Image: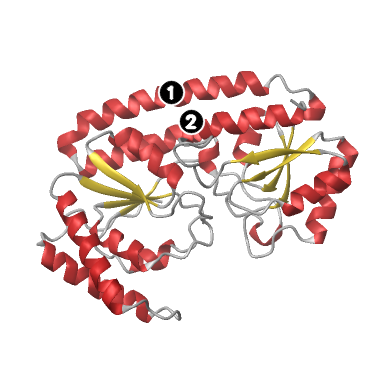
Amino acid sequence: MIKRGYWSKLERSPSQASLLATLALLLWLSGCNSTPPNSQTQSSSLTETTSTTAQRNQEKKVILTTFTVLADMAQNVAGDKAIVESITKIGSEIHGYEPTPSDLVRGQEADLILDNGLNLERWAEKFYNSLPEVPHITLTEGIQSVEIAEDAYKNKPNPHAWMSPQNALIYVENIRKALVDLDPQNADTYNANAKTYSEKIKELDQKLQKELATLPPNQRYMATCEGAFSYIIRDYGLKELYLWPVNAERQGTPQQTAKVIEVVKENQVPAVFCESTVNDEAQRQVAKESGARFGGVFYVDSLSGPDGPAPTYLKLMERNVTTLINGLQGR
């Protein structure tokens, strides 16, 4: 569902912006139980942050996304016509993220916030309530979701829709429309960039189809920590096996671990995997007790750093498939 606030924000001078951001910050902190930081340091940081953002706003639109994968997608569409930043940092776990006071300040000065929806960002509603004038758009609008099959999240949508390149094309189209609506004077650039980026995603989809088709029946299991790969499973005819369906407080319980060990043994699954933003201890135990290999780490909720193996969405998907095939085939 697409949710929009006011497209036209009040014109504010840097001093007015600083005052509003500071007031919003105080309201945010009043609802938190933690002790606020040193007031002098906080005041200096707020002034610097809001002043810098105000200067940038005079030149380009500022787009925030809820996590790094969406930031990369949005940057590919925006090109050099807008500033795109992620609220969560590289390596952050998205589901239970707790926004910081500086996140609120950045949100106050943003022109648009892009989120995933499908219950991924459980913190978003409170965050948006503190930013009533800042529009936000959900990028999974129009996507046919896959339902979670078990536990407390049974029958709820799996939020990891971006893990399907076919879904990624819908994300890109929703980003394009959002940027054109927000900044029509640069519509030609956004339209052209979206078209070019979509072609790259289509090429990626074809490449994954070809590579994953080579896996024999007993090597088509994607055994992971979190059930974040339901859309890949659906698109490419793989089999799903995971320790827990969605990242939550209890991960890798004895019951979850025992279940996966049994399935791995019965089906002679050659390798199991985990994700970069969670602890892989339970999955390594599965590998040890089942006789399977620990095949490596997938990137899902976060990109890697610029010098890492998954600095962009396209590289993330390619890296995951390479890790899967190499792990299953013992390369």
Query: Do the numbered discs 1 and 2 sit on residues whose CB atoms are within 8 Å?
Result: yes
Q: Is residue 151 left or right of residue 92?
A: right
Mark 2 neighbour density, 10 Å: few (under 14) some (14–19) many (20 or more): some
Q: Is residue 176 left or right of residue 264?
A: left
Q: Amino acid at mark 2?
A: Leu
Single out the mark in the foreground, 1 or 2.
2
Return the mark for residue 200. 1
Q: Nearer the viewer, residue 215 or 299?
A: 299
Residue 206, position in %: x, y?
55, 20
User: Which corner quadrant of the image does residue 250 belong to?
Assistant: bottom right
Q: Amino acid at mark 1?
A: Lys
Residue 11, compared with residue 292, is above or below; it is: below
Query: What residue is shown with label 2?
Result: 314
Residue 26, position in %: x, y?
29, 77
Return the mark for residue 253. none
Residue 134, compared with residue 189, is above or below; it is: below
User: Which corner quadrant of the image does residue 45 belong to?
Assistant: bottom left
Q: Nearer the viewer, residue 41 or 299?
A: 41
